[in-house]
Amino acid sequence: MKTKSKKKFIIIVGKSASGKTTLADYLCKRFGYRKYKTTTTRPIRKGESWKDYNFISTNRFLNKLSKNEFIEYKSYNVFNNGIEDIWYYGTPILKHFRFNPFKYVIVLTLDGAIEFANYYGNENCEMIYLDCPNDMREVRARCRSQGNFDMKEWKRRLKADDEDFPIDKVKHYCRIINVTDKYVEDIAEEI
């Protein structure tokens, strides 16, 4: 069975711990999408690998940024193990995308998704917003933190997510999929 989308890029957006990476990985494994990896300076989490992100140093990121190698980027002031830090995320430019036959899936912020679609053309992109309740997101965040859950950082993320995903803007740009009581297979079928 194939997904319904005919677009070159499926852009998955949603608040922290809403299931974006899990869905992207499933679309790659089950439907043959290629993962369009973003770049980050944040530390790799337990269980992650280089298939999830391009993990680089802050200095290297800023060097690439100065050379205009990203479509879009964002920085976050975070608490990492109780210490203030800045993490950068950026979307590298995919060269020759028009000449390859592949379909891609990428996980971005809403603003990043809009910039991405503007760069590659809205006709080539479908934005999917994963709507997930806060209590469910917290359970997921606690599970993936493997005992290192930082409530101060979680509260910061909740506030940032509310600012980054205003519902009117989400409705304007994205197809919304409610993930409550759904398996990843069900969500993928909706796409």
Image: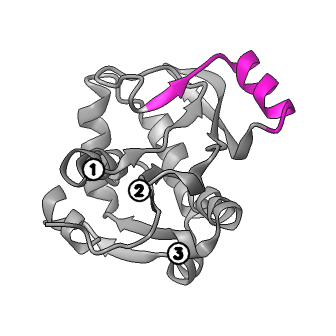
Q: In terms of image quadrants, where is residue 168?
A: bottom right
Q: Which residue is pictured at 72% across the width and 18% down the height?
A: 60
Residue 117, image x and y in percent?
62, 65
The numbered mark, 1 or 2, whose residue comes first in the sequence reads 1
Q: Amino acid at mark 1?
A: Gly
Please say whether residue 56 is one of the residues in the magenta stretch.
Answer: yes
For label 2, the crowd category at 10 Å Cα-Cα, with few meaning under 14, some 14 to 19 and many 20 or more, is: many
Relative placement, left or right, of 58 versus 147 is right
Quarter of the picture holding the N terminus: bottom left
Q: Which residues are magenta?
A: 53-68
Residue 170: mark:
3
Q: In terms of image quadrants, where is residue 79?
A: top right
The numbered mark, 2 or 3, whose residue comes first in the sequence reads 2
Q: Which residue is pictured at 77% across the width and 28% down the height?
A: 64
Query: Which residue is the site of mark 1?
Result: 32
For label 3, the crowd category at 10 Å Cα-Cα, with few meaning under 14, some 14 to 19 and many 20 or more, is: some
Residue 103: mark:
2
The answer to whether the residue labelled 1 contacts the one labelled 2, judged by CB atoms less than 8 Å apart, is yes
The answer to whether the residue labelled 2 contacts the one labelled 3, judged by CB atoms less than 8 Å apart, is no
